[in-house]
Image (cartoon, helix red, strand yellow):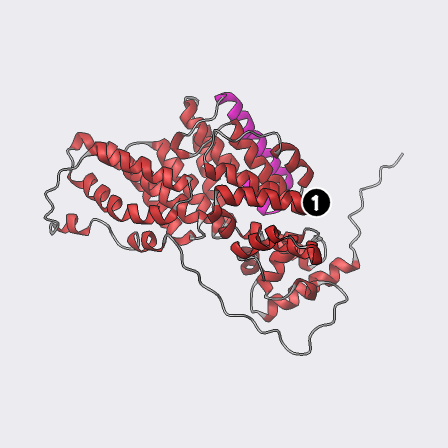
Amino acid sequence: MIKRKPTAREVDPKDVEFGRRVKRLREELGMTQLQFAAQLERTGSWVSQVERGIQPVTRLDTLQAIADALNVPVQRLRPGTPEPSTPVEIPPSVSYANDLEGAAQLISGHPALGTLLGTDTSADPVSMEALRADVDEIWELTHSDEYAAVSESIAELLPALERAVRVVDQDQRPEAYSLLARTYQALAAAFVRQGLPSPAWVAADRAIAAAEQAGDPLSVCAGVFRMVQAFVRNRGLGQAAHAARTAVVALSARDDLGPKGLSVLGALHLTLALVSARSGERAEAKEEIQKAREIAARIGEDRNDFNLEFGPTNVEIHAVSIAVELGDAGEAMDIGLSINAEGLSLERQGRLLMDLGRAYAQRRRIPEATESFLRAEALTPEMIRNHGAARAAIKDLMLMSGDKLTSDLAGLAERADAMS
């Protein structure tokens, strides 16, 4: 019996028409496929497949993201909708005040020029104990999403640390550089969460340099993790994948990592899972999550090495996020509802609730989605305001609600800037 070759999926004419509209609108804006893909946090090949009708777009949040990137209402993308006779006016970009603007300005220059040039006449002694406490506090503020306090505290701490690594005794310099690396890692994490990828990139790069001066290669890799997050936030998925894989290969070659090294390695696998999911690479995303699970099982407990919060619980929180990214709402709910995240930071707890809200929204379960978002907001209000996918899901919930819109959902949408 002759085996027949499997036939390719038959292309739906509606998907072809949808793709043609996306391509025409993209070209009207003068965007290349790669530029458009970067805005969507996807790959150029994914955009090409969408525009040719090969890759159907069925998720509401993806459809909304495409419409937002093209500056058109979602309805205009639907096949059969008449094209407007006059060009659609592109609204001006809107800028918002950011609690970390002061910190971003601080790292735009060199915090220790006075020390280098010999013009800093400060004779204040360096207290390593005080610096340790201040760095711990910066991380506590970062994990609690208290970014205004981060910006205020860093204004004194960062120059003090940059001075310390240059003036303390030689035997104290490794610890001083280690504290500096931790501080820049905290800044990078905070910048990413507030949607500031450029300063996050700068902070991560400085964290890597300081960790190397400290003689701590694992901290260097933790800095790479922060840089990968900056790349993802900046929609540089190719850069993110390259940086993460380079670190994974280097760490995997060691057979003496111990729990701290395994935590870093596992966290990098989690970032690769996210990059794969954002690129539409389902099998690769699942594979990376499984690798992280296996590493977490080897560690056997939730840890917080390099403030990565890596462990079995955090892996499952990421698994929820990846399932939502892939449109597997049922899987996301099954995993998410079984997680007890009380031992992790407010940021991790809030992220779990936010992703559960997105999963419920994908299933059009409006009351449960609203409750999850409200609980996430109570823990980490900044996350709901700054996460584009959360705002898109809240918009979808409002559209689904119609004339049954509740005051709770309306208030949430207003606070999250998801009304329009």
Residue under the point 56% across and 45% down? 374
Residue under the point 33% across and 49% down? 151
Nearer to us in this view, 68 or 225:
68
Image quadrant where one finds the N terminus: top right
Nearer to us in this view, 91 or 70:
91
Q: Which amino acid does label 1 sit on?
A: Arg
Which residue is at the far right?
1
Residue 340 drawn at (x, y percent): 55, 29
Q: What element carries label 1?
A: loop
Q: Is residue 217 left or right of residue 127?
A: right
Magenta highlight range: 274-300
Residue receiving disc 1: 363
In this picture, is 77 found above or below 335?
below
Q: Would you say the magenta stretch is mainly helix, strand or loop?
A: helix
Residue under the point 50% across and 70% down? 92
Nearer to us in this view, 5 or 235:
235
Which residue is at the far front?
407
In this picture, is 285 found above or below 388?
above
Residue 244 drawn at (x, y percent): 47, 40
Residue 371 shows in this picture: yes
Asked if residue 294 lies in the magenta stretch, the reply is: yes
